[in-house]
Amino acid sequence: MAIWNGRRKVRPVGELWDKTELGSRLPPSQSLKQLLEQDFNKKIEAMKAEFQLEFTKLSDRIAEEVARATAQMAQELSQVRDQLTQVCGELEQTRLQLDMLNKTETPRLSVQSYADAARMTSTSMSSQSSSAARSATPEPVFCTVDTSRVPEDHLGDATPTMIRKTVEQEMRQSSDQPHWRCVAMTRDGRNANRLRIIGV
């Protein structure tokens, strides 16, 4: 409680000062320092909030990029797996075709070796020209037939047997070897559409 002493109001020693009154009684330099500290603290808090917001945005963006890259890698891995399955299927189909080719070819072509074919060719030519001297064994002729561009409606004419007959006819008509014949035929292991023909 304040006590009037004449014209002045005397404050008791134990009574607290009002904050606004105390602040107004602080030196100007100290008040300015508090204002600067408060402004600095506000700026620090604002920078922290802005940094936290930018960090959250960056984290979300990184998570999206990682998810997108993971999905793309999973898709590419699936495509590679499908391609591998397709290649394995093509290899199995080629193996089956080779087995069928070995079964459908004539015994002379499937069992006869190249050396046997060469000896038989030489014996046949010698017997046909008994008056002439024995001729040398002709050099084998190699050729490759690619059936990848055969139209679908003519695939029935592109069987190994039909190709062998066609090549033999063409060789006999276009060359001076009327008895030329195919002694072996194999399929390319890396490309099922390519047939290798050996003839003498």
Image (cartoon, rainbow, N blue to C red):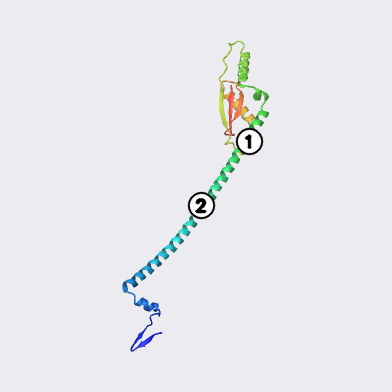
Q: Nearer the viewer, residue 26 or 113?
A: 26
Q: Position of residue 152 (x, y in %)?
A: 61, 39
**Secondary structure of residue under mark 2:** helix
Q: Nearer the viewer, residue 107 or 30?
A: 30
| Residue on which disc 1 sits | 92
Quadrant where the N terminus lies?
bottom left
Say whether residue 70 is left or right of residue 49.
right
Q: Residue at x 37, y 77 (%)?
A: 22
* Crowding at mark 1 (Cα within 10 Å: few <14, some 14-19, many 20+): few
Up-down relation of residue 138 to residue 51 (above or below): above
Up-down relation of residue 40 to residue 5 (above or below): above
Circle number at residue 199: none
| Residue on which disc 2 sits | 66
Q: Quadrant of residue 32?
A: bottom left
Quadrant where the C terminus lies?
top right
Up-down relation of residue 79 to residue 161 (above or below): below
Q: Residue furthest front?
A: 13
Task: Give amino acid for label 2.
Answer: Val
Q: Position of residue 134 (x, y in %)?
A: 59, 12
Q: Nearer the viewer, residue 5 or 131?
A: 5
Say whether marks 2 and 1 touch (CB < 8 Å).
no
Up-down relation of residue 184 to residue 31 (above or below): above
**Secondary structure of residue under mark 1:** helix
Task: Give amino acid for label 1.
Answer: Glu
Looking at the image, is mark 2 or mark 1 earlier in the sequence?
Answer: 2
Q: Residue at x 38, y 66 (%)?
A: 40
Q: Nearer the viewer, mark 2 or mark 1?
A: 2
